[in-house]
Amino acid sequence: MDGDPTTRTVVVDGAAVLCSLGGVDRADLDPVVLLHGLGGSTGRDFPFLLPLLARTHRVVAVDLHYGNRPTVDLEDLAGQLAEVLRQVLPQRRVTLIGFSVGASVAAAYAATSSEVTALVLVAGVLRATARHRLLAELRAGLPPGESLRILDVVVAHSPTFLQGRTPDQLSALGPFLRDDRTSVQSELFASTDLEHRLPRIDAPTLVIGCSQDDLAGVDQARALFAALPNARFAEIDSGHAVLAERPAEVLALALDFAGDPQRHRPGSVLERSQP
Amino acid sequence: MNGRGEPVEVDTIIVGSGFGGLGMGIRLARESERSFLILERADDVGGTWRDNVYPGVACDIPSHLYSFSFRPSSDWARFYASGAEIHRYLKDAAREEGLLPRMRFGTDVLEMRWQGESARWDLETTTGRYRCRVLVVAAGRLSEPRIPAIPGLEGFTGPVFHSSAWDDNVDLAGKRVGVVGTGASAIQIVPSIAGVAGSVVLFQRTPAYVVPRADRRYTEAERRYLSRVPGAVERLRSQIFWDAEAGFARRIGVPSAIAEFRDAALGHLAAQVADPGLRARLTPGYEVGCKRVLLSDDFYPALASGVVELEPSALAAVDGSVATAASGVAHALDVLVLATGFHTTRPPFASRVFGRDGLALSERWSDGMVAHASTAVAGFPNLFVIDGPNASLGHNSAVHMIETQIGFVLGALDHLDILGADVLEVSREAEDAYVRELDRRSAATVWLNGGCSSWYVDDRSHRLTLLWPDFAFAFRAEVGTFDPDGYRFSAAPVLSAI
């Protein structure tokens, strides 16, 4: 193990974008790019995935700049990612893994790039529903404080996971960052509409849905799977915060898929793991 | 008994009837028409869980995961099963799967020798001779007690026995009992006998990291839930498995994961032991995870309450009834319990297996155990070793590993059938490449970097030979399906070396 990942700041249109890098680049293996989820950061979402993928792959996790305005355009984020990758991984094709709102950015990027050899969309949304908008409104209306934290904790985690925590662990859970980025991401999440972009994605895709996901909803993952011509589908018994609840299962699926993205035919539903 | 005349001949012989041997037998019986026998030196099935009956014996892996995936039970009484309950589970499995007629109890296998001319394994046992085409050795990893060479031990005036050979005839009530060792057995024995014995002295060479166990009983309603709700047992097993898998990050040197694990163990120690001096003596000087991490909620309290005296050094010498520690302190004792572990890196069965050209497996393994796919050894045709080299885990269930190996063996046998061949043997090149890759992965692990000595590492080569240095899911992905690449197949008889 090479210890903690190193970081590098890339400037895109005057904004600083933090990249966390791990692993050694090998010519025969595409680097893996990670995009964190709603209310998260590389540090919060990938403390497991980043170092463990870095055992075998070059890994770059990107904390995109979500801007200072109330809303952000998905095109702009995809463009920002393109520029980051141009600087950090020039001329390289990549395996791209996007989680939650990061899955939307990953899909938007893959729709315009031919550099993605394998795309993994974890707990993503195809098109936001009334429920997503209501949740975002509820969040926006709550003042910063314990009620907001509890709302975030409850919608992000499965009952199974919460039941297994001690009271101390429960009060330490707070997956959503308390800053403007989270509001912008929440807004973006609640207005997601990827439908017109997906037919443009050629890269073999693995869609991972979480069967107890109360934030994105497992149906949204199934809908992504259906909307992508070249997609396979796997389901994990977890809440939205699958990187906290079942990180090793995500790793297992990601490694298996990155190793041979075409092993399972488009349209395949992967068997549930039966350890 | 089949002493004189022709040996008993079957297609496949399995040596051992613990989780490995029984699991192999169950799948063979369910899925094939092969003739097979299971040879067992004891008079009952159960392996480790038959032999280890010491007070407090229980498993460190949750019961729903420490059981066969193809024989799920909704009836486990506790989150962590007792040794007796696991033994019962294995006995039930053997009986209900119809394996008892295939068992040959009281059969200690003295020699297993490959005969190139006939392409068969010939076995000499205490109940006669056997012959088979395929030999599966599932003789166990924690089956041969390691007895330390302590001067005067044989002259000890009271009863002395190893933890895995517990003597129920010895009444500990009111006795001065010495327990040697602080591994997984000792930590269960000590609190269990503390209330019975007159006094207990624990000889500690190296402290262990201990984390909370948080064991609990399943209520009747919970057990009914697991039995009535479709898929509930499988779901629970899956959840426990993936939780445990996440723990591998602690073994591969992810700093935040290691720190969190260390904090959990040292926090547990601080919460349960108030005396700073005792706490210091119980604090390990190596990295967490290097040696097996133990689970207990009653070990530290037994020491903290003063019921058990901690001797913070190894047992060095015995003279009559006096056991003297390396520190020089002498303890007068009535009973001595050796919780000193097992021969793990040098399995005794290896000196009884002779492959091509009469080479002993123990010779082949003189620098430490090696096998391709952790299962097949070059120079030993049609031999499969279950739970042998690099097939154990420090972070997840051994039964999952065993099931992976069983899948590999069944795949290899199917492949032989498809080819119409009798014999398969892995090439030395393929085995070497596999071992090199494992050495590469091991280099980054806490087992080699944690600053301890442990039974996971071979002291001759300093290679990690016991553990699979990766996730359990990776073992399943890499080894669970037989890949004929690197193997040679031939029809019997094989007259010369390949």
Image (cartoon, grey):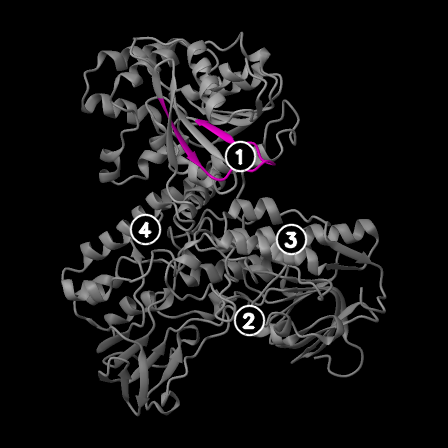
Identity, as a three-letter code, of the amino acid under mark 4:
Arg
Inspect this view and state whether residue A115 appears: yes
Q: Are marks 3 and 1 in contact (CB under 8 Å)?
A: no
- Which chain does the residue under circle 3 lie in? B
**Circle 4 sits in a helix, a strand or a loop, which is it?**
loop
CA gap between label 4 and label 3 equals 32 Å
Q: Are marks 2 and 3 in contact (CB under 8 Å)?
A: no
CA gap between label 2 and label 4 equals 35 Å
**Circle 1 sits in a helix, a strand or a loop, which is it?**
helix
Considering only vertical position in the picture, is A223 above or below B410? above
Boundaries of the magenta span: A17-34
- Which chain does the residue under circle 2 lie in? B
Q: Position of residue B169 (x, y in %)?
A: 37, 81
Residue at image mark 2: B347
Residue B378 sits in which quadrant?
A: bottom right
CA gap between label 4 and label 1 equals 32 Å
State how many labels appear: 4
| Nearer the camera: disc 3 or disc 1 | 1
